[in-house]
Amino acid sequence: MLPPELAATLEMRWPTLAPKAATIAADPRATIVPEHATPDSAGRRALDELTELAARATRDGSLTVEGTLGEGGMGVVHLATQRSLGRKVAVKTLRTEHRNRSATLKLLREAWVTGSLEHPNVLPVYDVALDPEGVPHIVLKRIEGEPWSRLMRADESARARLGVADLLDFNLDVLMQTSRALHFAHSRGILHRDVKPDNVMVGAHGEVYLLDWGIAVALCDDGTGRMPVVGPERELAGTPCYMAPEMLGAEFGELGVASDVYLLGAVLHEVLAGRPPHEGPNAMAIVSSVLLSRPKLGPEVPAELAAIVERAMQPDPAARFPSAEAFRLAVQDFLHQRGSLRLAERAHKRLAELVARLDAPREGEGSKEWRAETYNLFGECRFGFREALAASPELATAQEGLRSATGAMIRYELSAGDARAAASLLAELPDAPAELAGAVERALAEHEERQKRFAALEREHDMGTGQRTRWFLSLVLGLLWTVSPIVLSRAFPMEHGSAWATVGIAAAFLVLVLLLGLWARDSMSKTAINRRVGAAAVIGCASYLALAVGAGVAGLEAQTVVTVALVMWSAIAAMVAHGIDRRMVPTALGYLAAFFVAARFPARAFDAMAGAHLLLTVNVAAIWRPPVVSPRLARLVAARSSRPSGDPSDADAA
C-alpha cells in the first residue's frame, strides 16, 4: 500500500501516465522513449549543419554493407566493411517507415552523446553522416558478444566460454564496469536513464560496453543543440521495471546523477534476486512499486549486497549513493571481502555445531576426549573468523562470530568450574559484555579463595615441613625410651615392685617431651602433622603418668603398669597411623605384640617395652628420615629436567 500522500499524488498525476499504461503492463522491460512531434529549435539548428554533408556524401562511398545484425523499433543495424581500413563495422540507420526529421534527430543525438564519451566501457562511434537523401548513418565498432541479460544466468557452457568461475563475481564485475561508464558520463554532465542488462554488451574477450544512449539527456545545454537537455517539462522515460520514482515524470522529482545510481541498484537487485525490482499484474501495481521503492531480497543474499541495493534504491535521491563511483566502490569492497565472507560463513557453520554441542551435552561430557573435541571445534571457529578478519578487519559478521564463539566457550568453562580457562578466553574477547566479565571476575575470586584454602590445607599436611626436627626428636625420644626400661630394670629390680616406682620415670619423660617441644616449637607448630605428632607424644607420656599414679593408688605392681601401658601405646600408635602416617602401622602392631608378651611373661615386661620402643625408633627413623636433597632443590631439578633443550631460561638459570 502506498502512503496516503503518494497515493494522492499518483491519483492526481495518473492521467499523464495513463497513455503509457498499456505499454507498461504489456512489457515492463521495454524502454519507454519520450515522444517529441517535431525537433526543437536547437535540434533543427544541429540538423541544418549536417544537411551540408548530404550533398557530398554517398551511401556506400566508403562502406560495403553485407547484411543485417539486428533491428529495433525505429532503427536497423547493418554489418559492413569499412574499406579504408579493411575492418568490420556496425552501421546503424533508420527503418524506411521512420525516416523523418524527428527520428533522424533522435538517432543523431544518440550518436552525438555516445561519441562524446570516449571511455573503454562506452561503444566507440567512428563516424556520423547523412546520405544524399538525408538518412543518418552511424558507423560504430562491431561487438562480437552477447547482451549481459543472456549471460547473467549463463549455463556452464557459456561460463566456460567466457572463463567464468563464479557467476556472482562475473556479474558484479560487469556491474562495476558499467558503473565506471556511468561515472564518466556523469562527469561530462550526461545521464543515461536506461541502464539495464539488455543495454550492456559483453564481448567475446570479456570487454563490457554500456549501449543505447537513446534517451540520455544532458544536465546543461552546451549550445550546439546536439545534446538533449533536461527540461522542466519531462515525460515518463526509461524502463518501468527498473526506473526510479523521479523518472515517472517531472512532477515526481528532479532527474540527476542519483537517478542513474538508482538504476544500478535495480540491476544489482536483478543479479541477486533473478528478477527486476518492479513487477506487478498491471501498470498501477508497477508504478506503485516504483514509488515505494522497497526492494525485497531473500535471506540467502549477502547482507552487505542487500544493504547496497537498499541504499541505491532509496525513494529520496539524497539518501542514495552520491555517485556511480561510490556505488562501484561499495560493490568492490564486497568483492574484496567476499573471500573473508566465505571463511566467516564456514566458521559460522562450525559455530552452530559448537553451540549445539554445548547447549545439548552428550554422553561423556567432561571427559578429556569430549573436552578435546569441543576445543577442536572451537579452534576451527576461531581460526576461520581470525583469518576472515585478517583479510577484512572491519567484517562485522566475523567480528560477531568470534565474539559469539569465545563467549560460548567462556560460559562453558564457567559451568565446568574452570575460572582460569574462562579468564584466559575473556582476555581474547574485546568489548566483552559486562555481565560475562563480571561472572568471570566472580569465578576468579572464588577460585583464588579456594586456592588459598587448598594451599593452607596443603601446608598443614605437608610431611616435608619440619621433617628434620620431627625425625630428630622422634629418634632422641625413641632411643631414650628404648634404653631406659632396660637400664632401670637392671639397676633397680622391680619384680613385684609397686607401681609407684614407675611414676618418676613417667613424669621425667613427660617433662622431657614438654621441654623438647618448647625448644622445637617453631618447626613443630607450623603444620597439623607436626602438631599431631607432638600431641601424640605428650598424650602418650601423660597417659603413662596417669596410669602409673592410678596403678599406685590401686596398689598394683609395676609390671602391670608396663603391660597396660603397652596396649595403650599400641592404641595411640594406631591412631597416629590412621590420622597422620599409615607407615606407623608396624609400631602399633609392635606395641600390641609386646603387650601380649608382657601379659604372658610379666617378668619380661620391661624387656618387651624396650623392644617395642626400639621398633618405634627404627620405624620412625625409616619413614621420617630427611632426604639427602632438599624438597625445594628436588623440585628445581625436576623442572629443569622436564624443560625442552634450548629453552632460553636455561641460559638465565646458568
Image: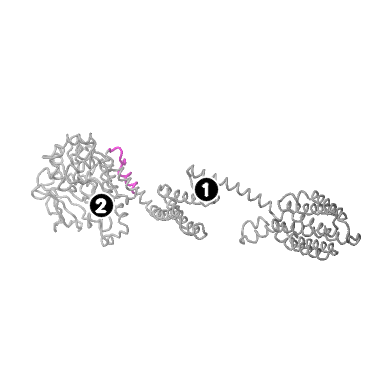
Q: Is residue 621 above or below residue 306?
A: below
Mark 2 surroundings: few (<14), some (14-19) or many (≥20) residues within 10 A: few
Residue 330 percent across, percent down from the top left: 34, 46
Left or right relative to 301: residue 37: left
Q: Which residue is mark 1?
A: 427
Q: Amino acid at mark 2?
A: Gly
Front residue (pair 92, 592): 592
Asked if residue 327 lies in the magenta stretch, the reply is yes
Question: What residue appears at the point 63 percent right and 50 percent down from the top-left corner?
Answer: 454
Secondary structure beneath label 2: loop
Quarter of the picture containing the C terminus is bottom right
Residue 554 percent across, percent down from the top left: 84, 53
Residue 60 visible in the shown view: yes
The residue segment tinted magenta is 316-331
Residue 92 percent across, percent down from the top left: 16, 51
Q: Is residue 219 above or below residue 150?
A: above
Q: Which residue is mark 2?
A: 274
Question: What residue appears at the point 32 percent right and 50 percent down from the top-left corner?
Answer: 299
Asked if residue 399 lies in the magenta stretch, the reply is no
Closer to the N terminus: mark 1 or mark 2?
A: 2
Residue 154 percent across, percent down from the top left: 25, 58
Q: Amino acid at mark 1?
A: Ala
Mark 1 surroundings: few (<14), some (14-19) or many (≥20) residues within 10 A: few
Left or right relative to 372: residue 6: left
